[in-house]
Structures are given as structure tokens and as C-alpha cells.
Image (cartoon, helix red, strand yellow):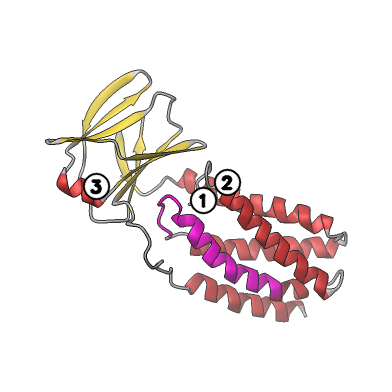
């Protein structure tokens, strides 16, 4: 029975991870450039400088990091050549490398060297993935207990199922753009497939309680995880 469940789950998860990232119709223009600054001091500020003026961009403060987003329409009209950085009581102006393409540019600013590196750091990726996985296990594990599941085999099945589906979800979110609000849309989109996978696989991994109670648990657990993810997205980055 478990082998059959694993086979079905693997097929569904393959569909999840190979699914094309959707384009949301009539969505707002995404930023051209996103700059991540990890563990900034309280006085941190950043401004792009051009021959015709300055561009402060839009700032989003999260736990442990700050995002600055800049839009193509502004950058194209006032092409920045330098950046003014205020941190630790000092203000410095450094040359700005060619970071701007059209859209989807993400760079991380190292405050120690004042160097821009493409993408995000490995430690940041590990932190966010770990937060998503262990946060989900904590939330859904609490509900699993409230629903009366006590059997040791049930808990092993629950943890195994969640680790597999969370691995697929995080693989799917790798190429999700880091724009304010966008990761949540994609999380909801892929969470639907996770819900379907868990709704089917729960009956192979967990045999305790009735099928109806197992289905109810999957529905409530996934809904609660999404609601909490929405609330957390205001102060902790989802991607």
C-alpha cells in the first residue's frame, strides 16, 4: 500500500516541479532591479545617483534584511551611474556596475566590501527554505496532534509526506521572482498542487482515524499554512 502511495505521490510531485511558472494576467509591472541588503544597521539608506537626479526606489523592511526595488520606467529615463550608501554613521558614494537589464535583476549588496553580487547568498536561501519547511511542520504538526493522531507510524508518515511535498514546493519556488507580493501568489498557485498530492497520499502514509478525518486535516492544515504565510509575508520574505 505504501509503495503504491509513493508511486502516486512521485507522479504528482513530478507534475508540480515540472509545472511552468504562470504569468498573472493584468498584474502590475515588476521591478527592473531588486537589491537585497542582509542585516543592515538601523541607519542604513541607499540612493541611486544619475546625472539628472536621485532615485530612492521603494524600500521593504523584513526581519534580517532590506529590499530596494527600482522600476525600468524610472531607471531608463535617469540611468544611474553611482550609488550613495549610508551605514554605520558613514555615507559613501561608489560606482554602480551595469546591473540593469529590463526586468528580473536581483543583486545582493555586501556592506563590508560595498560590492554588488548577482542573485542572493547561499546562507539566505538556506535560511528561507529552512523557515518554510520547519514552519510548516510546526503548524501542521500541531494540528495533526489536535486531530487526535497519536500512533507512531502516523507521525512518521505525516513527517515523511510533508518533507517530500515541501521539497517539491521549494524546488518549484526557486525561479519565482522576488517582487513584493509576487512570491505569495506563486505560493498559493503551487500550494494547490501540494494540497491535491497530500489529499491523495495521506491515505497511504497515515492509516489512523477515518478517511474523512484525514481529508479534513489536510484541508484545514493547508489552509491554515497559507493564511499564516500571508501574515508572515509582511515581515519575513517568502522568496
Residue beneath disc 3: 99
For this view, does 171 lie left or right of residue 152? left
Q: Secondary structure at mark 1?
A: loop
Magenta stretch?
A: 176-199
Relative to 213, does residue 79 appear above or below in the rendering? above
Which residue does the image show at 59% across and 52% down from the upper left?
Answer: 229
Q: Earlier in the sequence, mark 3 or mark 1?
A: 3
Q: Nearer the viewer, mark 3 or mark 1?
A: 1
For this view, does 116 lie left or right of residue 201? left
Which residue is the extreme one toward the front? 26
- Judging depth in this view, the residue of 18 and 210 nearest the camera is 210
Q: Are marks 2 and 1 in contact (CB under 8 Å)?
A: yes
Q: Earlier in the sequence, mark 2 or mark 1?
A: 2
Residue beneath disc 1: 238
- Judging depth in this view, the residue of 100 and 188 nearest the camera is 188
Residue beneath disc 2: 232
Amino acid at each position: 500500500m505504501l509503495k503504491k502511495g509513493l508511486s502516486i505521490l512521485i507522479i504528482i510531485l513530478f507534475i508540480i516541479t515540472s509545472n511552468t511558472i504562470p504569468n498573472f494576467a493584468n498584474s502590475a509591472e515588476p521591478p527592473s532591479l531588486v537589491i537585497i541588503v542582509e542585516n543592515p544597521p538601523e541607519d542604513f539608506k541607499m540612493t541611486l545617483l544619475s546625472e539628472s537626479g536621485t532615485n530612492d526606489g521603494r524600500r521593504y523592511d523584513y526581519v534580517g534584511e532590506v529590499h530596494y526595488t527600482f522600476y525600468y520606467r524610472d531607471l531608463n529615463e535617469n540611468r544611474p551611474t553611482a550609488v550613495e550608501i549610508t551605514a554605520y554613521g558613514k555615507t559613501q558614494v561608489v560606482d554602480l556596475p551595469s546591473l540593469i537589464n529590463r526586468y528580473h535583476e536581483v543583486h545582493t549588496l555586501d556592506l563590508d566590501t560595498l560590492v554588488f553580487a548577482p542573485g542572493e547568498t547561499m546562507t539566505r536561501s538556506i535560511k528561507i527554505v529552512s523557515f518554510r519547511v520547519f514552519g510548516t511542520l510546526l503548524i501542521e504538526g500541531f494540528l495533526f496532534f489536535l486531530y487526535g493522531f497519536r500512533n507512531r507510524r502516523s507521525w512518521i508518515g505525516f513527517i515523511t509526506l510533508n518533507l517530500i511535498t515541501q521539497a517539491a514546493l521549494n524546488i518549484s519556488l526557486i525561479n519565482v521572482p522576488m517582487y513584493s507580493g509576487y512570491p505569495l501568489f506563486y505560493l498559493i498557485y503551487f500550494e494547490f498542487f501540494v494540497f491535491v498530492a497530500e489529499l491523495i497520499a495521506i491515505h497511504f502514509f497515515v492509516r489512523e482515524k477515518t478517511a474523512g478525518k484525514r481529508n479534513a486535516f489536510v484541508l484545514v492544515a493547508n489552509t491554515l499554512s497559507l493564511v499564516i504565510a500571508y501574515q508572515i509575508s509582511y515581515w519575513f520574505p517568502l522568496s
